[in-house]
Amino acid sequence: MTYPEFWRSLTALYSEGEAKAIARLVMEVHFGLSMADVLCGKMGDEAELRQIHRRLLTGEPVQYVLGRAEFGGRWFHVAPGVLIPRPETYELCQWVLAESRGEERILDIGTGSGCIACTLAAELPHAEVSAWDISETALAIAQSNAQRLNVNVTFSQIDILQLSIVNCQLSIYDIIISNPPYICQQEQEAMERNVLDYEPSLALFVPDDDPLLFYRAIAGYARQALKPGGTLYFEINPLYAAALQSLLSKMAYHAITLREDQYGKPRMMKAIRP
């Protein structure tokens, strides 16, 4: 199979630009070939290439096929049990990094692959970073990423929806950050099949009648667990930005700030605990 044959076959599922980007990623990441190598006629092992090709034609995301995804210049192991890290989420990390003193106690709720927690731990070596997730599979992947990146993160299996706020530790964190599930079931029709069919629904969806389910639980916990003046950072669903801002205001958070992502969508919000 030639390189043009490889990427052109993917246009059955993707645009030409996306197909070329996927093909290039396979060559560079899996086979270690530069585009100069490919243009000179070099290709990876034929049997491996065809196996990858078959998986891609089913719609399986290339990150799962390769077992890794790039996030903020670092590579993270990913598998179907965790959400594939997105560039918008790295923008949330950059917001924290820009405002950090460097020595905070930080909690990442719903860590998934560990991309947020590991990135903050790597960039803030003097910070104390903890991360929670409900999924054993996600925690195992996140721990492996922390070990491979040689960063210190304390992981715990905790369901924020079942956490008793009454018994929580008081005023222990400077920063709580989360990219929780925020897509309503009714939004599925507008989503790509490769996301719906392969990425974990547990990390994506909330009930149509309660889109702020996780935000309410996290903000309620953060009211107790953040130090006074501590900061809560969220990745958000643009459709519910106003509703979330209202919720946080009613919970007495202040200095609530909404920020757009690189695509011009309201995607991040921060608030200060009174």
Image (spheres, rainbow, N blue to C red):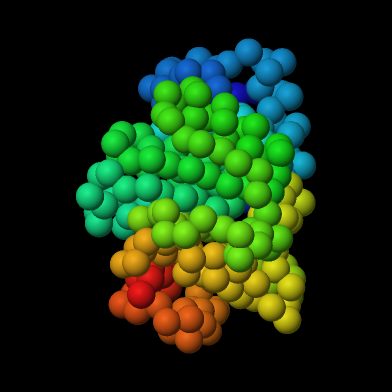
Tell me: residue 19, above or below residue 122.
Answer: below
Relative side of 266 to 101, left or right: right
Q: Residue at x 56, y 38 (%)?
A: 155
Tell me: residue 192, above or below residue 219.
Answer: above
Quarter of the rendering containing residue 259: bottom left
Quarter of the rendering containing residue 202: bottom right
- The percent position of residue 11, horizontal first and vertical second, equals 63, 47
- The percent position of residue 92, horizontal first and vertical second, equals 39, 57
Q: Residue at x 69, y 31 (%)?
A: 53
| Quarter of the picture holding the N terminus | top right
- Can residue 27 be spotted in the picture? no
Which of the two residues, 228 or 23, is positioned nearer the viewer here?
228
Q: Residue at x 42, y 29 (%)?
A: 151
| Quarter of the picture holding the C terminus | bottom left
Quarter of the rendering containing residue 7: top right
Relative side of 143 to 117, left or right: right
Tell me: residue 251, above or below residue 205.
Answer: below
Which of the two residues, 268 or 73, is positioned nearer the viewer here?
268
Which of the two residues, 108 or 22, is positioned nearer the viewer here?
108
Number of numbered discs: 0
Tell me: residue 247, above or below residue 193.
Answer: below
Relative side of 7 to 244, left or right: right
Which of the two residues, 66 or 98, is positioned nearer the viewer here?
98
- Can residue 137 be spotted in the picture? yes
- The percent position of residue 196, horizontal first and vertical second, equals 73, 56
- The percent position of residue 200, horizontal first and vertical second, equals 72, 50
Q: Residue at x 40, y 77 (%)?
A: 253
